[in-house]
Image (tube, helix red, strand yellow):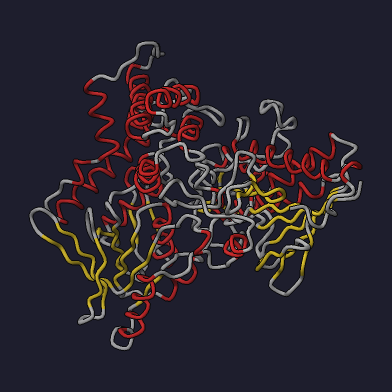
Amino acid sequence: MSGFAIAIIGAGPRSLNVIERLCWKLRQQADLPSITVHLIDPGVAGAGAHPPNQSQLLLTNTLASQVTSFSAINPDDPQSGPSGPSFTEWATAAGYRRVGARYEKAAPDQGEPIGDLDYLPRAMLGEYLSYSFRKIVAEAPARLKVVQHRQVATDITTCPETVVLEDGTRLPFNALIVATGHCETMPGVEDRRREAFVERGAKRNAKLAYFPSVYPTEKLADIKPDAVVAVQGLGLTAYDVIAELTVGRGGKFEGEVRDLRYCPSGQEPKILLFSRQSLPYDARGINQKGIDGGHVARFLTASAVGDIRERRRRQTGDARLDFVEDIMPLLRKEMAFGFRSATTGKDIDPQGFLPTDEENRVIDRILSARHLLEADSLAGFQHGVVAHLRSDLSEALKGNVSSPFKAATDTIRDLRAGLCAAIEYGGLLPQSHRHVVENFIAMTNRVTFGPPLIRNAELLALIDAGIVAWAGGPGARVELACEHDRFTIATAFPQESSQVEADVLIIARVSGHKPLQDMRGFSRQLIANGFARPFRNGDYEPYGLDVDRRLRLVRADGSPNLNAWAIGYVTEGPRFHTHALPRPGRASTQLSDAKLLVDDLLATLCQKSAPQKQAAEPLESLS
């Protein structure tokens, strides 16, 4: 049996998981042929969206102790012990310590050791992922060869099947894996209109600028200190912008978290925040559950979702679910269960559990934030937002067990199995799927997957210092004030309308993977050449390439591709919540996906190359 050539497009964490699984299979099965992996990515192998050379100011929003690149020694048993260090363990071994507010390689008598509650910079995560790649490849069996191609893949051909690189190199493959993750989207109509506005107006207003994307954040250095900067988006990307325009310009924070103060450098622009709802993200509570602890789902389980789906099938003939009617009551019940458990400090019997009216009011307030959205004016809205940030920070400092509010929101982190069972592979009615993508995910990101609490303490200090304020409220929209050569953020409040002008507009959000709008174009070529299609749920097209339950790319006619797979964020659409990294000691969707893909890939290639199939197509053309 001759060797296989596997082309992997994208060299981020998902590719690491795949390569590690290939290593495992080769160790376990002596009869497998040799494998050459062509790893195609212009970036640092392993790092993906986390380049090691990015700004040290940008933090992860997951505890480093809860991040790993490695599977267990026995991938079928998460408790069998790790095959490599966690992010925290690597950082400690590499000599990193917390020195003031920064993380640096330092002598043992300097600073403090990194602990289980540290949120480390994303640049360090990039280093860790790069180290993980080198370790996995260095320990790989001799029959696995990994060849890096630090280029962009531009096209894919058939007869023979090859990946075409930007320098014209053609790499034949027996199997293709797409693991490109996030993509940079081509400019839309609104982007082009704003860019033209800036080009015309910059002659009269030298501060006028438009940033449709944030990264790399170093480009924000072009913003002048006397500019007014409007930041659209209040998620984690906005915190990156704020960090670059404040501490990144020489400002400093002083004092403790509960009473943090900001000392300006004088180089900070005025920063104004807004978004679709203009609601701030809640801070993550201090982790009191240990590295591998979490909420155990009692109500929103995969089994419960299966029962609801079967009931829908019997009643309507259609097994697709309505997310609001079928799933949200179970999610709310989980939150209420977490809230009551933290309030009473006792183990609650889930049998017969029903939320009280007061618990339902608490959940309503958390999820909808009507007390903020119903403000009469911009001043009233900002006053409410600041009060909410202070109250939420106080709850976050209590911890995700001691604070009933944080215990309630933290339950959502551990409901992924039930949510995936409901959402994935077109499991929802199309309009319901739209609601999940455009509303539910934004809401859960705001209340559950927010920043480390230090970031909101810093935000409050910046508000107190007059550096940061709100540009608008719910429904804020961007207008082009041509007569002033500035952007206007307009909001219609019940009591009065507000118009706030800015010289710079920054779009601080990361869009999903739209394959037909990918700037690099490889996804477009996959589709054009018949290897793949965008995912659609009825008349709704969210994000991502379509895959079947074996992660095979789906062709335009709905048939699975026989030698092309996809994994990770590029499949966010048919899949759900594909971007999280594996967690030590716990079962991981990312690792199970790598296992599923690699096992199917090898079984397929081995079957096609078996002696009885030798009269069929050669390995160079397996579609």
In the rendered image, residue 589, in percent from the top left (x then y), is placed at 59, 36
Query: Does residue 113 appear in the picture of this structure?
Result: no
Image location (x, y in percent) of residue 47: 63, 55
Image quarter for residue 243?
Answer: bottom left
Q: Nearer the viewer, residue 415 or 433?
A: 433
Residue 28 visible: yes
Q: Quadrant of residue 583?
A: top right
Where is residue 82, by image quadrant? top right
In the foreground, 13 or 116: 13
The residue under the point 23% across, 80% down is 482
Residue lying furthest bottom: 203
351 w.r.t. 363: above or below: above
**Residue 616 location (% of width, % of height):** 85, 50
What residue is shown at x 78% (from left), y 42% (from top)?
602
Which residue is at the far left?
495
Horizontal arrangement in the rendering, residue 487 relative to residue 115 (left or right): left
